[in-house]
Amino acid sequence: MSEHPLGFVSVKLSREGRTQEFRLEPTAAPPRSGDAVVVQTDAGPAIGHVVPTIPAIADRRRPAADSPHVVVRRASRDDIVTRLKQQHREQEATRVALMKIRERGLAMKLTRVEQIFDGSKLIFYFTSDGRVDFRELVRELATEFHTRIEMRQIGVRDEARILGGYGACGRPLCCSTWLQSCEPVWIKMAKQQQLSHNPSK
């Protein structure tokens, strides 16, 4: 059992998501690039795939020694099967939620549905121009899927980060690839770069 030289690995939790760094326990066998692993995130356990770490930025991306973001274990076959079933459930939850949103005429746009890996709840991410009374929707979804339901309103930049895409430069969006946080963009900055002054863009 050899210790990983960096003490952490880079992991992608979804194909279109950005890379995140997770600390390795000193006693754990280090996973290799391409391995599926179970990691601990702010939202709870999740499954992802190890990707190569860029040496030039390794020191800047190194998690703190006491970071709660840690690799729990290599993913087993059962873990992977469980995640595939959850993805199917997320697709079904998306279909049902879109139908109920249309039926109720709610002014909200569903972005993504995510099931926590331990199966404890479904999280519905949505955008809206204002406040939305979704209490009845939550009750119906809880009855339909027999689990806790959480609705999270996000901004358009968070939506772009979740969905991915390409910018005016022709490259994948920075917020969905390498940016760690979305800092405010001022109109002056947009003018200097000759970008659209529309906040939604």
Image: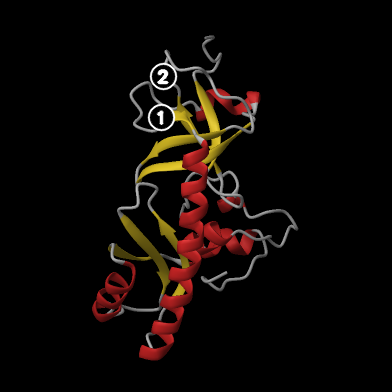
Q: Amino acid at mark 1?
A: Val
Task: Return the x and y of residue 65 as percentages of the image width and height.
Answer: 37, 21
For the residues bearing labels 1 and 2, Cβ distance under 8 angstroms: yes
Up the image or down, 15 lies above or below 3; here it is: below
| Residue at the extreme right of the image, as rendered | 170
On screen, residue 114 above or below 36:
below
- The mark found on residue 70 in the picture is 1
Q: Quadrant of residue 97?
A: bottom left
Question: Could you tell me which residue is drawn at 37 percent across and 61 percent down?
Answer: 123
Against 80, residue 126 (above or below) is below
Residue at image position (46%, 31%) is 22
Residue at far top of view: 2
Under circle 2, the secondary element is loop
Tell me, for residue 25, which label it has, or none. 2
Front-lying residue, 13 or 188:
13
**Residue found 28% across the figure and 66% down from its top:** 146
Label 2 crowd (10 A; few <14 / some 14-19 / many >=20): some
Quadrant holding the C terminus: bottom right
